[in-house]
Image (cartoon, rainbow, N blue to C red):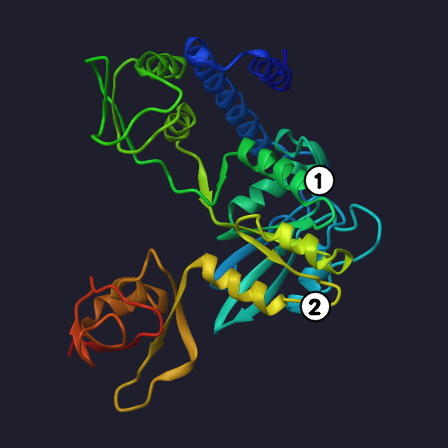
Amino acid sequence: MSALQKIAEIEAEMARTQKNKATNAHLGLLKAKLAKLRAQIVTEGTKGSGGGGGGGGFEVSKTGDARVGFVGFPSVGKSTLLNKMTGQESEVAAYEFTTLTCVPGIFYHKGAKIQLLDLPGIIEGAKDGKGRGKQVISTAMSCSLILIVLDVMKPIIHKRKIEYELEGFGMRLNKQPPAINFAKKEKGGIALSVAPGYHLKDCDEETITQVLKEYRIMNAQVRINCNATIDDLIDVVEGNRKYVPALYVMNKIDQITIEELDIIAEVPHHVPICAHHEWNLDGLADMIWKYMELLRIYTKPKGQIPDYTAPVILPAQKNTIEDFCLRIHKSLLAQFKVALVWGQSVKHNPQRCGKDHKLMDEDVVQIIKKV
C-alpha cells in the first residue's frame, strides 16, 4: 500500500472517530502517523521531480531584502497582480493554468527591494504532488511572507482548501512556534511537566507518551510552557515546520457590493483589492511591509549628512548592530570599534553603542572603525 493510500485510510478513520476523552489517545496516535507519512511524501518529492511535470522554472535565485510568494487557485488574478505591482510580464488569460512556471518580479517599497514570486495555481491534493503541487509549496516555504490570493466571489471555500494544503505540507500560517522544550535522553523514560498556569488541550500524559512511542522515542524531557494540543507536540517533534506570516488578498472586489465587502472585512489578516483596476494596491503594499516586520536603518558617513536614499533593510528579529554590519559586509565586523546611533533606540543623540545594541526603524548609524 502506498503512502497516499495509507494517508487516505487514516483520514477516513479520523473522520468517523468521535472526538471525546476516551478517543483522544487514539486520535493523537493517528495524527502522529499522518504527520510521519506526510513527511515521507515530502522527502520523496524533493528527491525526485517533486510532482507532475518537469522542474523547469522553479529554481529562482533569491534576490532583494525579502521574498513574497503568491499562492492561490488557478485564475484568481495572481499574474495580473504581479504585473501591476512590478511591471513584470506574467502571462494573463481568462482560462485556468495560464502560469505554468514560477515568474519572479521586483517591487520597491520604502527603500526595500522585495522579490515577488507568481507561483502556478495550486489544486486540491497539491500537498500530495498533484499539479506540481510539491514544487509550488516548496517554493512558498522559502518566502518571508505568503500572499494567498482569493477570488472574492468564493473566498472562504478557497481559503480553507489552501490552508489545508499548506498545513499538510508543514506550513503554519500566522502562528508562533509552540513554547514546548523537547529533548531526547538516553534513559529515564518520558518526563513530562506543564508550567504553572498552562494546561494540555484535548490530550493527556498517556496520549503524549503514545505519540512519542510512535516516533520510537522512549526517553525524553518534555516541558510545556503554553496551552498545548497534541498537534503542537507533533510539530515540535517533527522539527521541520515553517512558521510564516500570511495575508489573504481578496481580489476582484469590483464584482461585489459594499454590503458584501463589509462581510468580507470580518476575515482576519485580509486585504481587499482589485488588481485589474489597481484598487487599494497601495494599501496592500503597506500591509506587506507591516507583516514582514522590516526595519530601515540609514547610514551616516563621517562628517556628512545621513544617506536617506538607500537604507539598510533588516528583519525585526535580527536588528543588532552586529547584524547591521554583517548586512553591509562581513569584513566590517572585524574592524568595528564602536557605533554612533541616532533615533528611537537610544536615550540621547548620538549615543555610543556596542555590537549587541538593538536598533529600531529609521535609526541612523555611523560605524567607527579601529585605527
Drawn side of residue 124 relative to residue 110, left or right:
right
Q: Secondary structure at mark 1?
A: loop
- Residue 169's x, y, as percent? 55, 33
Q: Badge 2: few (under 14), some or many (20 or more) residues near its Cα, within 10 Å? A: few
Where is the N terminus found, in terms of image quarters? Answer: top right
Which residue lies under the disc numbered 1?
54
Name the residue furthest front.
Answer: 259
At x 33%, y 31%, the residue is: 227
Q: Secondary structure at mark 2?
A: loop
Compare marks 2 and 1 and give the one earlier in the sequence: 1
How many numbered marks does the figure carry?
2
Rendered view: 109 above or below 55: below
At x 63%, y 55%, the residue is: 262
Rendered view: 328 above or below 131: below
Relative depth, front residue between 291 and 135: 291
- Residue 50's x, y, as percent? 63, 35
Which picture quadrant has residue 161?
Answer: top right
Q: Amino acid at mark 1?
A: Gly
| Nearer mark to the viewer, of 2 and 1 | 2
Label 2–label 1 contact, CB within 8 A: no
Q: Amino acid at mark 2?
A: Glu
Drawn side of residue 242 relative to residue 73, left or right:
left
Where is the C terminus found, in terms of image quarters? Answer: bottom left
> In the image, which disc is placed on residue 64?
none
Drawn side of residue 290 relative to residue 102, left or right:
left
Per the model, the C-alpha gap separating discs 2 and 1 is 34 Å
